[in-house]
Image: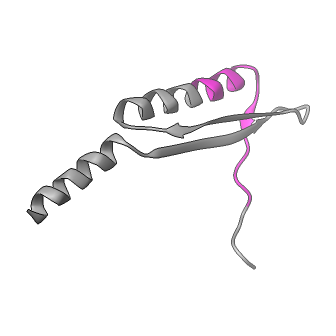
Amino acid sequence: MQLKLIIASVILTALVGCATYKTTLTNAKGETVTCEASGKSGIITGYYLRRGFEECINAAKAQGFKEVPPPDTKPE
């Protein structure tokens, strides 16, 4: 019985979940573009969510934008 519950939990987790992607890109003029995608994602929906996010990044890079590294959040 416990094995069935564990298997059901793993399957449910693979089919349902949340995903959030966000990055900021900047160009030589200091202009910025933010690409972000978030929502509930399963195996298939997560693929399309990530794909749309990557398409936004690629379009911005084609216009001369570059990804900004995340700020260093480590305490000094």
Point out residue 6 in the picture as x, y percentages from the top left corner.
19, 59
Residue at the outermost left position: 1
The residue at the point 11 percent across, 61 percent down is: 3
Image quadrant occupied by the N terminus: bottom left
Point out residue 63 in the picture as x, y percentages from the top left corner.
75, 20
The residue at the point 12 percent across, 65 percent down is: 2
Closer-to-camera residue (43/9): 9
Along the horizontal axis of the image, is 32 left or right of 6?
A: right
Along the horizontal axis of the image, is 68 left or right of 2?
A: right
Closer-to-camera residue (30/41): 41
Closer-to-camera residue (56/7): 7
Q: Quadrant of residue 54?
A: top right
Closer-to-camera residue (76/1): 1
The total of numbered circles placed on residues is: 0
- Read off the magenta span: 55-71
Q: Quadrant of residue 61?
A: top right
Image quadrant occupied by the C terminus: bottom right
Point out residue 12 in the picture as x, y percentages from the top left corner.
29, 47
Along the horizontal axis of the image, is 70 left or right of 18?
A: right
> Residue 68 lies in magenta, yes or no?
yes
The residue at the point 44 percent across, 35 percent down is: 46
